[in-house]
Image (cartoon, coloured by chain):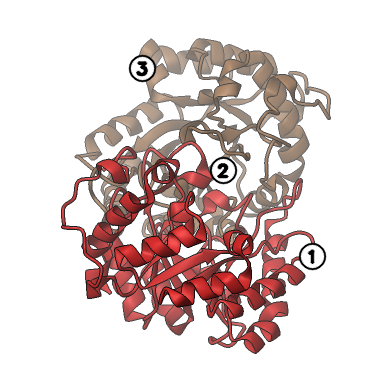
Chain colours: A red, B brown
Amino acid sequence: MSARDVPTNAPARVPTPQPGDPRLARLSLNQRTTANWSLREAVAGCVAAGLGSIGVWREPVAEVGLEVAARMVRDAGLRVSSLCRGGFFTSGDPIGDNITALDEAAALGCDALVLVPGGLPSGDRDLAGARRRVADAVAALVPHARERGVRLGIEPMHPIFAADRGVISTLAQALDIAEQHPPDVVGVVVDTFHVWWEPGVLEQIARAGQRIVGYQICDWITPLPADTLLSRGMVGDGHIDFAALTRAVSAAGYRGDVEVEIFNADVWAAPGSDVLATLTRRYVEFVEPHL
Amino acid sequence: MSARDVPTNAPARVPTPQPGDPRLARLSLNQRTTANWSLREAVAGCVAAGLGSIGVWREPVAEVGLEVAARMVRDAGLRVSSLCRGGFFTSGDPIGDNITALDEAAALGCDALVLVPGGLPSGDRDLAGARRRVADAVAALVPHARERGVRLGIEPMHPIFAADRGVISTLAQALDIAEQHPPDVVGVVVDTFHVWWEPGVLEQIARAGQRIVGYQICDWITPLPADTLLSRGMVGDGHIDFAALTRAVSAAGYRGDVEVEIFNADVWAAPGSDVLATLTRRYVEFVEPHL
C-alpha cells in the first residue's frame, strides 16, 4: 500500500474480469480517470473492458459536439452515469452556465449533474457566506432541473479543497442544503475520497437515502501527492474502507452506477487500457461484492 | 495573499510592536515555528521580541535536559503555554510515553499537554476503531494527568491528516471524547489550521467553553505547499477568518496564551528574528484586537 502502487505495477490479486462479466454491469469510467483519452477512445475503452456506463465531462463533449457525443455513447450501448460538472457557485453569476449544463445532461440522456460547490473568492475569508451562496444557487436551479429531468448532485468536497474548490465540506452539510428540495430534483454525490474521513459518514449515507445521485470511488493515499488536485489513488492503494462505505450506499437504496474517478498523474501516464484493467480488478475485489 | 508571501517579503501593514507592548502579553511562540533555533535561542528570541510565553517541544527540551530547560524558561520570565506533544494513541502501547510527557509538562510548569491523536496503523482501514482507541487512551491517562495538574488537550486535526497523523477530525469529535471527563483534566486544542473549515465551528468553540486548553494559530494558504506536513502559512497570508475564530475563543472564556505554530519550509528558511517580527505584526493586526 503506497503511492507508488500505480496501475502498471499493482499486484493482480484477482483475475481481470472479462467483457460480459455481470459484475461489471454497474461499473462506470469517469473519463477524467483516463484523461489522455478523447471521448471516442474512452467510449471504446469502456466497451472493450465490459463496462456498462461512462461519466463524461463537458469539455470533451464540447470537442466533438453535443449531438455527436450523445450518439456516440448511445450507439455504444453505454449509459451516461453523470455529467461533470456544474456548480462553482461562490463567485460571479453562475446560473446561466449551470442552466446550459442541465440542458447538456438532458441531451446526453444523463439524469445527474455533478455540482462542484466552488471555493472562496480571492481575498474573501467569509466561508459561511460562500456556503450560503451555494444553497441559494442550488435553489435557483431547481425549476430548470425539474423541467429537464436532471438531478442536481451536490458534491461535498474534502476540506483540503474548502478554500479553493468546494466550500461544502461534509455529506451532512450537503444534505442540509439538498433537503430543502424534493429528493427527485436535488441530491448528493458520494465520493469516497471526499467523505471517507467524515465522523458519522455511515449515518449520513443512510440519511441521504434516495438522495444519492451518484457514487464515485477512488482512494486516499499517503504520502499525499504534491499536487492536491492530482492526489487521488487507485481503489485499493490507500486507506479507505470501501466495504463499509459501499455497503452503506447500497443499504441506503442506491441502485445506480459506480463511477471510478481518479485524478492522478501516475494513472494518467499509464496506457488507458492498463488503467481499465486495473480498475476493473480493484472494483470486483473491493467494491462490487458489497453492493 | 499568496503562498509566496513569506515573512521576509510580507508587506508590513502595521508597525512591528516593540518589547513591552502590552498587546504581546498573551502571544506565545511555538518553537516549531522557528525550527532551526535551539530552545535557548527561541527563549532569547521571545524575550527580545516581547512575547510573554513559549510553546515547547519535547525533543529540544530533552537536548538540554528537563531541569535546565525549565530553569531557562523560568529565568527568562516566560510562561510555557504548552508542551508538544503527547498522543499517537492508535498503535502500539502509547500510555507509558504519555505518562512521561505529563511528568515533563509538570516539571516545566506547563499545564497543557497537546495530544496528537495518531493515524491509521499501516494496512488498517478501520478508522472508527482507531478513533475508539484514542478515546480509550485519553481515559487511561486521566488519573495521572489529574495528579500532575496537567490538562490533556485533544487536538482535532484537519482531515488531510486523518490517515497518517490524526484520526480525530473535528472539534465536535474531540469534544465528544473530552466531555466524558472533567473539564479541568481533559480539553481540546483549537488550532485554526485544523478547524477553520469545520461546519458549525463557532458553535463548537462555544460548546468547548472552559475546555479550551490551548489556542494555536496559523493560516491555510493556497496553493497548498507540496509537503502536507509543511503546508501551514503565516497568519494573514491565507484564507482563515481569524477575527471570527478569535472572537469565538474569547467569548468561550479562554484567557490563556495564543500560540503561533507554523510548519513551513519558507518560514523555517527565514532568520528567526524576521519570523518573530512578522508574526508579532500579524498577531496585532489579525488576532489580538479580537481577544
Left or right: where B152 falls relative to A149: left
- Of the 4 image quadrants, the one containing the C terminus of chain B is top right
Q: Can residue B135 be seen in this view?
A: no
Disc 1 element: loop
Q: Can residue B186 be seen in this view?
A: yes
The answer to which image quadrant residue A198 occupies is bottom left
Q: Residue at x 39, y 45 (%)?
A: A267
Dot 1 amino acid type: Asp
- Could you say which disc has been placed on residue B193 in the image? 2
Taking depth in this image into account, of B73 and B93 the one nearest to the observer is B93
Q: Which residue is drawn at 70% across and 64% down?
A: A89
On the same chain: label 3 and label 2?
yes
The x and y percentages for residue A112 are 53, 76
Chain of the residue displaying label 3: B
- Judging by the rendered image, the residue that carries numbered circle 1 is A93
Dot 2 amino acid type: Phe
- Height in image: B136 above or below A128? above
Left or right: where B187 falls relative to B124: right
- Could you say which disc has been placed on residue B62 in the image? 3
Dot 3 amino acid type: Ala
Taking depth in this image into account, of A79 and A116 the one nearest to the observer is A79
Closer to the chain start, of discs 3 and 2, is 3
Q: Are marks 3 and 1 in contact (CB under 8 Å)?
A: no
The x and y percentages for residue B219 are 63, 39
Left or right: where A139 falls relative to A160: right
